[in-house]
């Protein structure tokens, strides 16, 4: 059943040095035009009823509240749906947050990245730590009861003590959910260039593993459930939209460069504005690439994504049972009732374990 929709908003005030997500500088006019095309794109699909709606980016909070309203009014949102918007600190004020709340946005995902001003500067963020905390507190004042914060670790020059300090600040705020990603050195980014020039160094594997172990143990002590490799939630606040990705369920992706999964087709939209607009003007769904998911690939996705869900795991069918038993024997998987889940050792080496299912 298709009941999830993702909108990609490809605009940012300033590009962060490490990021290679699809996003550009923009002005109000460009953003208005883009929103009109999002609405035209939705009309190219049959009408569905959405139980989860996700505005991601980029920086969706650069959209005017009227534009967010326009999009929401053009789709059918189920009662009790989870409606998430990614919000960048310093791009919104209390008034904006109250307005989007009144439109039905009931979950925020805030990109904090770090509470350390030195690291925030290195990352090229537009806010300092206090400004991120202020946006978070404004969101509480606006009535948001489900907030997720994004953080990163394994950053240039970051120490174990730095990570400990980040976690203390995080747990003081006590968001319902947080995601924490180890830095990926994306080719072509300013960070990557600095790495090549020797201005930055990659954190060594042992130190990165030590940081990750610290995050897991401190989060658990603070009452968070480590339910996905990079995601932690207070009980009952697991991300409903993202969980659908990991459960290998269908979702509609709308917008420039958005990916989606409908029936047996995984697709990615055009990544150039002119091609995206041109296709929609011609009444054609603006897909750039598609992959037909045959039975074998469906299974691969099911295992690779399913194992990311650390509490749920996978229920292997006959042809995969041997592989699971072998990984159990070597200590990477463990049994949980009828399922297999990643063990502690498996979580630390998740990428290697997951590729076993390819
Ligand atoms: C799509 S971004 C959007 C978030 C929002 N625009 C912001 O930055 O505040 C989602 C998250 O991906 C993470 N991220 C982006 N680039 C990354 C990289 N190179 N390595 C690890 N995590 C990254 C950041 O934590 C970011 O908050
Ligand atoms: S991390 Fe977020 S704010 Fe920074 S460039 Fe990427 S999408 Fe934009």
Image (cartoon, rainbow, N blue to C red):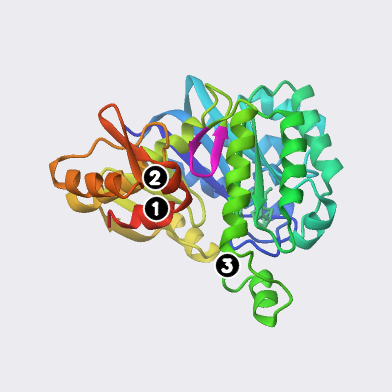
Mark 3 sits near ligand 1, with its Cβ under 8 Å away: yes
Q: Measuring from the top left, give residue 221's x and y in whole percent.
A: 63, 29
The residue where tag 2 is placed is 44
Residue in the image at 64% along x and 80% along y? 196
Q: Given the current orientation, which residue lies at the most extreme top position?
A: 79
Residue in the image at 69% along x and 59% along y? 155
The residue where tag 3 is placed is 186
Q: Residues within 10 Å of mark 1 (few under 14, many from 20)?
A: few
Element marked by disc 2? loop
> In front of the other: label 3 or label 1?
3
Question: Residue 171 appears in which quarter of the rendering?
Answer: top right
Element marked by disc 3? loop
Q: Quadrant of the C terminus?
A: bottom left
Magenta segment boundaries in residue numbering: 226-232
- In space, the residues marked 2 and 3 are separated at their CA atoms by 34 Å
- In space, the residues marked 2 and 1 are separated at their CA atoms by 7 Å
Q: Is residue 125 visible?
A: yes
Q: Is residue 347 magenta?
A: no
| Disc on the earlier residue, 3 or 1 | 3
| Disc on the earlier residue, 2 or 3 | 2
Element marked by disc 1? loop
Mark 2 sits near ligand 1, with its Cβ under 8 Å away: no
């Amino acid at each position: 059943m298709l009941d999830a929709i993702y909108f990609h908003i490809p605009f940012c005030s300033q590009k962060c040095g490490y990021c290679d997500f699809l996003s550009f500088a923009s002005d109000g006019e460009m953003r208005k035009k883009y929103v009109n095309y999002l609405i035209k794109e939705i009309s190219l699909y049959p009408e569905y009823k959405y139980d989860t709606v996700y505005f991601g980016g980029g920086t969706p909070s650069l959209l005017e509240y009227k534009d967010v309203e326009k999009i929401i009014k053009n789709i059918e949102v189920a009662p009790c749906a989870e409606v998430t918007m990614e919000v960048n600190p310093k791009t919104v004020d209390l008034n904006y947050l109250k307005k989007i709340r009144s439109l039905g946005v009931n979950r925020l995902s805030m990109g904090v990245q770090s509470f350390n001003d030195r690291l925030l500067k290195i990352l090229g963020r537009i806010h300092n730590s206090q400004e991120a905390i202020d946006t978070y507190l404004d969101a509480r004042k606006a009535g948001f009861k489900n907030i997720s914060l994004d953080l990163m670790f394994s950053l240039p020059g970051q120490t174990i003590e730095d990570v400990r300090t980040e976690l203390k600040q995080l747990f003081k705020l006590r968001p319902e959910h947080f995601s924490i990603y180890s830095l990926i050195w994306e080719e072509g980014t300013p960070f990557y260039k600095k790495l090549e020039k020797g201005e930055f160094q990659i954190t060594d594997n042992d130190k990165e593993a030590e940081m990750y172990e610290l995050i897991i143990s401190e989060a658990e002590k603070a009452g968070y459930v480590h339910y996905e490799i990079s995601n932690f939630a207070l009980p009952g606040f697991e991300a409903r939209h993202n969980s659908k990705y990991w459960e290998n369920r269908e979702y509609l992706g709308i917008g420039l460069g958005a990916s989606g999964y409908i029936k047996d087709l995984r697709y990615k939209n055009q990544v150039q504005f002119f091609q995206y607009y041109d296709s929609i003007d011609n009444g054609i769904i603006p897909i750039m690439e598609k992959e037909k998911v045959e039975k074998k690939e469906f299974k691969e996705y099911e295992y690779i994504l399913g194992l990311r869900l650390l509490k749920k795991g996978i229920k292997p069918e006959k042809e995969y049972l041997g592989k699971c038993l072998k990984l159990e024997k070597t200590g990477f998987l463990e049994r949980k009732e009828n399922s297999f889940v990643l063990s502690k050792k498996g979580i630390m080496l998740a990428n290697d374990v997951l590729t076993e299912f390819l």
